[in-house]
Each structure stands twice: as structure tokens, then as C-alpha cells.
Image: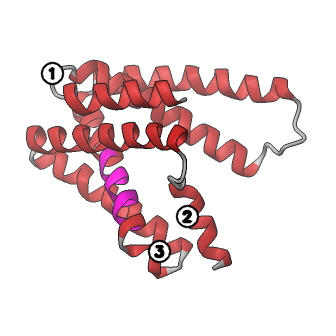
Amino acid sequence: MFVVFLLSGLTICFMGRSLFKPVLFIVGVWMAMSLIMLIFYSTFLKSNTKSWVGWVVLVSALILGCLLGWLMVKIARLGAFVLAAWGGYAVGLLLYNAFAYKMKSEAGFWGFTLGTALVFGILALCFFDHILILATSLLGSFMAVYGIGLVAGRYTNPFIVATLLEYD
């Protein structure tokens, strides 16, 4: 995962605007796969689930991710909204981990990060080029730093921070 996060993060960070359509496809695949895996593993799948079920979920998530990526490339404005929203979500995670973690509320965590994502998505519709450049650079840098954090250690997963707040 280190190599995947680092390479895709650096590509999105430094060439997001010039490679707009491939970046839209990559973001669509990553976003759909991440959401599907997060939902399935947090609700349905447990540690005692058969391994073939996990592989079926992974392949299904990849297929749905490719479909979402294709849709985002075909409808560029929708793709820009989703791309900027995901970049805004990354900004929300970074800001929450830096400053707002003292709220000690899981609802506050989700409200803050999703609110930031929505603001970035709406701004992308108004200021298409400027927000697109900002969102791709922030999203790519977050992915690259997260990839390095997987290897270097001591970089807490942002989703674990929300869980840790429950027990603090």
C-alpha cells in the first residue's frame, strides 16, 4: 500500500490539472473502493469471515470503482465536484487532526470533515480551475504523506482518531 499511496499521491499532487481525466478516473476508483471497503468491513464483514468473501467484496469494489471513474471522466463537472470534495475531505482530516480533535465527538469529526468536503465541492463549481488545482494538490499530498506514514509509523490513521475519541 505504501507504493500505491505514494505514487498515486505524488501523481495527483504534481500533475492533477495536466492529467485531469486520468486523475478523475483514479479518484473515482479509489473513492468507490474506499467507501465500499469501509462500509462492508465496518458493518457486515468480521474477522471470522471466509477469505473468499473478502476477495469478492474487493473485486466488486474494483468493478464499481472503475464504473464510477468512467462516469466521472464522462461528466467532468460532476467529477470536478467529487474530486474537490475528496480533496476538501482530506483538508478536513488534516485540520481536524491538527486543531479540532479536542471536540471529542464522533459527530463533530464527521460533521467537520464532511462539511469541509461539501464547501470544497461547491467552490469547485464556482471557481473550477483554481479549486481543482488546490484540491488535487492537497489530496495528492495527503495520500503521499499517508503512504509514508504507513512505513515510517507513528502517523495515526485519521479514522482511528475518531474511534479513540470515544474512549478518551
Disc on the earlier residue, 1 or 2:
1
* Residue corresponding to mark 1: 18
Q: Which residue is mark 3?
A: 108
Asked if residue 90 lies in the magenta stretch, the reply is yes
Q: Quadrant of the N terminus?
A: top right
Q: Which residue is mark 2?
A: 161
Looking at numbered disc 2 in the image, what kind of residue is underneath it?
Answer: Val
Where is residue 78 drawn, in percent x and y? 28, 36
The magenta segment:
87-96
Q: In the figure, is residue 39 to the left or right of 120?
A: right
At 29% from the left edge and 29% from the top edge, which residue is drawn? Answer: 12
Q: Is residue 150 above or below residue 28?
A: below
| SS type, badge 3 | helix
Question: In the image, what residue type sits under mark 1?
Answer: Ser
Could you give the CA–CA distance between mark 2 and mark 3, rounded to whole angstroms?
Answer: 12 Å
Crowding at dot 1, Cα within 10 Å, few <14 / some 14-19 / many 20+, comes out as few
Q: Which element type, helix, strand or loop, lies under badge 1? A: loop
Of helix, strand and loop, which one carries label 2?
helix
Q: Residue furthest front?
A: 152
Picture coordinates of residue 122 (x, y %)? 22, 53
Q: Earlier in the sequence, mark 1 or mark 3?
A: 1
